[in-house]
Image (cartoon, coloured by chain):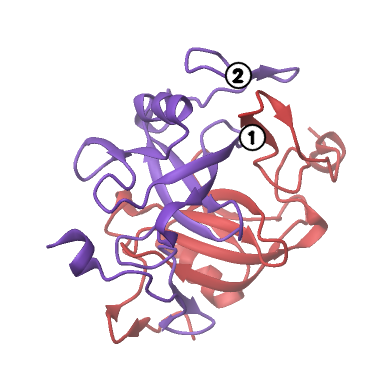
Chain colours: A purple, B red
């Protein structure tokens, strides 16, 4: 599928509906191998088109207000293996191979490294890298 | 943990930060058994507290602007088995046992029943129920 193609099937248009949510749709990123939910981020239409074109996880950073090519700084980019759209066409699910084994900027595989219930405040992830070394901040 | 308790660990407060995102935080719902991502929804603080108290998936419906006790109409409620918070404390991950085997109002197990890339517009889910029968609309 090229970036300019429209997605459709018998049930109609399957493109993400960027007219919703102020043009920023939530994106769930899941590890294609383990099924772990790695992170949640947002895409605008430009990020979506670049993701389709490059098969890399490209998002829109709300804090920086610009395209965020995941891994551009850490090297931990995401190779997209498949993409799903939800029933309302306003949420995207990416299955990815997570390069470097860590999606979270805090050095964990998943951003959801803390279980808060029924366990209360337990870190369940293991750090893959040390953020101070990788991001040099 | 009771609904009035605060979550914390050595890294500080772990409660969802409802001061962000206009008080509506995205929630990823994952099947505790299969690891399938079932749906994405939103919680306000009231939905969050009720989820903690009842161990059922309770959300805030943006379209109806009120609490949405998942399954209240279809019977397909979600029994929460564990809850995770992300690094920024603005996204919640629920692992659930999905009663009835279908989370999607269109009768599929997951709302992400359509793969759109690299396959283009392929329905990959199987209907568990017929929405016309369940919702009587």
Mark 1 or mark 2, which has the lower sequence index?
2
Please state which of the two labelled residues, at mark 1 or mark 2, is closer to the viewer: 2
User: In the visual, does A96 lie left or right of B8?
Assistant: right
Image: A59 above or below B34: above
Query: Residue at the location (39% across, 27% down)?
Result: A50
Image: A77 above or below A112: above
Tell me where residue A103 appears, x and y as whole percent.
Answer: 40, 57
Chain letter for mark 2: A
According to the image, label 1 marks what residue? A87
Q: CA distance from mark 1 to mark 2?
A: 14 Å
Q: Quadrant of residue B132?
A: top right
Tell me where residue B3 appears, x and y as whole percent.
Answer: 46, 79
According to the image, label 2 marks what residue? A7
Near-viewer residue (B41 or A135): A135
Query: Could you say whether the residue bearing mark 1 is in a helix, strand or loop?
Result: loop
User: In the visual, does B46 lie left or right of A73?
Assistant: right
């Amino acid at each position: 599928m090229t970036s300019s193609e429209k997605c459709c099937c018998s049930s109609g248009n399957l493109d993400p509906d960027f007219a919703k949510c102020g043009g920023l749709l939530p994106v769930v990123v899941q590890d294609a191998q383990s099924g772990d939910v790695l992170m949640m981020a947002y895409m605008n239409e430009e990020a979506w088109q670049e993701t389709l074109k490059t098969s890399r996880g490209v998002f829109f950073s709300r804090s920086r207000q610009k395209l965020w090519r995941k891994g551009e700084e850490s090297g931990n980019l995401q190779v997209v293996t498949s993409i799903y759209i939800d029933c309302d066409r306003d949420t995207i699910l990416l299955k990815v191979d997570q390069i470097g084994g860590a999606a979270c900027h805090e050095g964990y595989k998943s951003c959801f490294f803390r279980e808060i219930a029924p366990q209360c405040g337990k870190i369940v992830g293991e750090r893959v890298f040390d953020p101070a070394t990788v991001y040099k901040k």
